[in-house]
Amino acid sequence: MNDQPQRSFLYVVVCAAGIAGDVHQLITAAQAQGWDVGVVATPQALGFLDTEVITQQTGCPIRSAWRTPDSPRPLPSAHTIAVAPATFNTINKWAAGIADTLALGILCEAYGMGIPTVALPYVNAAMAAHPAYGRSLDQLRDMGVLIGSYEPHRPKAGGGADRFRWDEALELIAQIDWDRK
């Protein structure tokens, strides 16, 4: 395994979950490793984020909506993608190939483009018990997505933020065989 090339661009796809506002932890850690970072948020995730702070931290606008064909690209192309937190909805739609938001469109397209992708699920135990969730994780793994180790939290309790390891995304990225990409 080789180290990732210098100054690579990491997309952090953020989904709507109570811990999404802590995404700055992943951004800071990635920047410390030499990554340039851009954030792509699901439309619902925007309400969980301090968009001004993230925009200042990354130096890039947060992307959430499709751009028109004649609009300039606000972010460089992704070299790698980290989905954190990855919610039940996003995991299932992504695995099924549903691209009804910009974030999902980017994730679905990334597979065909060979962009290495990691995901840190954040779901409660009741949602994780649904049969579609396990099938979706298996499908994503079969697609080459590296999946984090977060154990689902209790339903209706929120929480689990103390057990969510933002830095695990970078640990998974470090496992990528860059010679094969």
Image (cartoon, grey):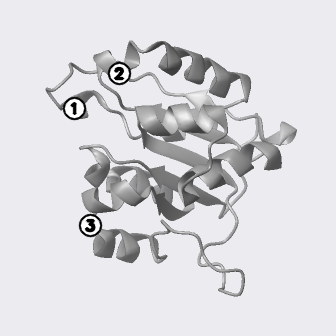
What's the amino acid at mark 3?
Asp
Report the residue at 35% width, 55% height from top.
Answer: 44
Report the residue at 76% width, 40% height from top.
Answer: 2
- Estimate how packed mark 2 is, as few (under 14), some (14 to 19) or many (20 or more) residues with alpha carbons within 10 Å: some
How far apart are the alpha carbons under marks 3 and 1?
20 Å
Residue labelled with disc 2: 127
Residue 98 in the image, given as x and y percentages of width and height: 62, 43
Disc 2 or disc 3, which is closer to the eye?
A: 2
Residue 104 visible (yes or no): yes
The quadrant where residue 27 appears: bottom left
Residue 96 drawn above or below residue 60: above
Report the residue at 59% width, 57% height from top.
Answer: 10
Tell me which numbered mark, 1 or 2, is placed earlier along the sequence: 2
> Tag 1's secondary structure?
helix
Asked if the residue at tag 3 contacts the one at tag 2, i.e. Cβ–Cβ closer than 8 Å, the answer is: no
Residue labelled with disc 1: 162
Residue 180 drawn above or below residue 130: below
Report the residue at 18% width, 32% height from top.
Answer: 158
> Which of these two is toward me, 98 or 61?
98
Residue 116 in the image, given as x and y percentages of width and height: 70, 42
How far apart are the alpha carbons under marks 2 and 3?
27 Å
How far apart are the alpha carbons under marks 1 and 2?
19 Å
Residue 178 drawn above or below residue 69: above
Specify the label residue 50 is tagged with. Answer: 3
Tell me which numbered mark, 2 or 3, is placed earlier along the sequence: 3
The quadrant where residue 111 appears: top right
Residue 99 in the image, given as x and y percentages of width and height: 62, 49
Specify the label residue 2 is tagged with. Answer: none
